[in-house]
Image (spheres, helix red, strand yellow):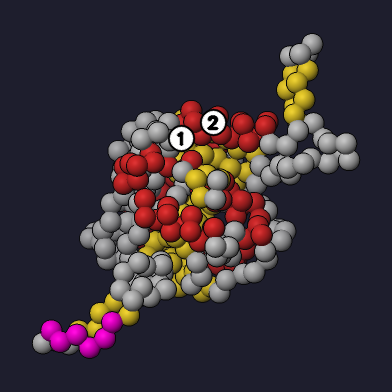
Amino acid sequence: MSLEVILKVAIFAGGKGSRLIEETRVRPKPLVEIGNRPILWHIMQHYSTYGHHDFVLGLGYMGDLIKKYISDLCQYNGNLRVDFANRDLYGQPDRDNADVVPHPPWTVDLIDTGQDTMTGGRLARLAPYLGGETFMLTYGDGVSNIDLDALLRFHRSHGKLATMTMVRPLTTFGHLSVREDGLVEGFEEKPKTATDWINGGFFVLEPEVFQAVESVNGDTVMWEEGPLPKLMEMGELMAYLHSGFWYCMDHLADKRRLEEMWKNGDRPWATWENSTRAGHGAFGLRGDGDGAGIGRGGHPGDWVRYKSL
């Protein structure tokens, strides 16, 4: 699963996660667990499966807990040796000279981007750590089995500054077929996916994006409300269609659903457990940038404002 091009991955990990307050009053949303692992770990594992091991996390709310988790994950998984004489702490192989728990080959920059900074400002503050090269971006609360190789190939093919992934989410709501006079003609209980394509995140961006959106960005601006509409107005935003699995952990019910899927072994986002690839496709997306925005979880034409991750 090697790639010719290995990219840095920026992750929004600083929002308050107010719609998941049952969990986020005591931990940041990226540390809410699915299968005894934070959803952040699941996201990073997926990128790492495709060879992208270099992460830049935009921290804010309870960012110290994310720092602690990452440092603990590095130090305390598997065997550990403490050298009191030299005041040193490092991983210790077992007797067969192999770690009991394999460590992911990650490099993680944990960047404080402000407690109240919105996602547009968070990304701008991460720019110095992204190496001035093409990079990937995602949210710290959504999992998917998106083919990152195919996403990157599509991005390279069109030559624009930005690629956004569009998805059709799983839905917990039934669909009704209703005539104009109000007569219900059919009902489908909990169809597998919704009919509309929405913004699922999983971006590929060129470094020139920062300069292109500078005039409409700032610490109080959401990534979806200023920069994305600006890129669309410029004709620099393209959309990649992912028809496979995608799910956002926005509410407690979402966490419970993902937990149940994990428990039952129905976890298509766990790409590190198998090499199956989902179907994919792509299309261009442009607009005038004056009216509709591209809020996460909303299709073009809707304006969905997310105040957390």
Residue 25 spot, x, y in % from top left: 36, 35
Question: In this figure, which residue is indicated by the disc labeled 1?
Answer: 59
- As drawn, is 130 to the left or to the right of 185? right
The structure residue drawn at horizontal position 34% and vertical position 42%, both measured from the top left corner, is 22
**Residue marked by disc 2:** 67
- Left/right placement of residue 48 relative to residue 217 reads right
Q: Magenta stretch: give its range.
A: 182-187
Q: Is residue 234 visible?
A: no
**For residue 282: magenta?**
no
Q: Is residue 61 left or right of residue 280?
A: left
Determine crowd level at label 1: few under 14, some 14-19, many 20+ residues with C-alpha closer than 10 A. Answer: many
Identified at 43% across, 35% down, the residue is: 27
Residue 132, x across and y down, in percent: 56, 43
- What element does badge 2 sit on? helix
* Element marked by disc 1: strand
The earlier-in-sequence mark between 1 and 2 is: 1
Using the rendered image of the protein, determine whether residue 154 is visible from the camera's viewpoint. yes
Q: Tell me the quarter of the image containing the N terminus.
A: bottom right
Q: Are marks 1 and 2 in contact (CB under 8 Å)?
A: yes
Q: Which mark is residue 143?
A: none
Q: Amino acid at mark 2?
A: Lys
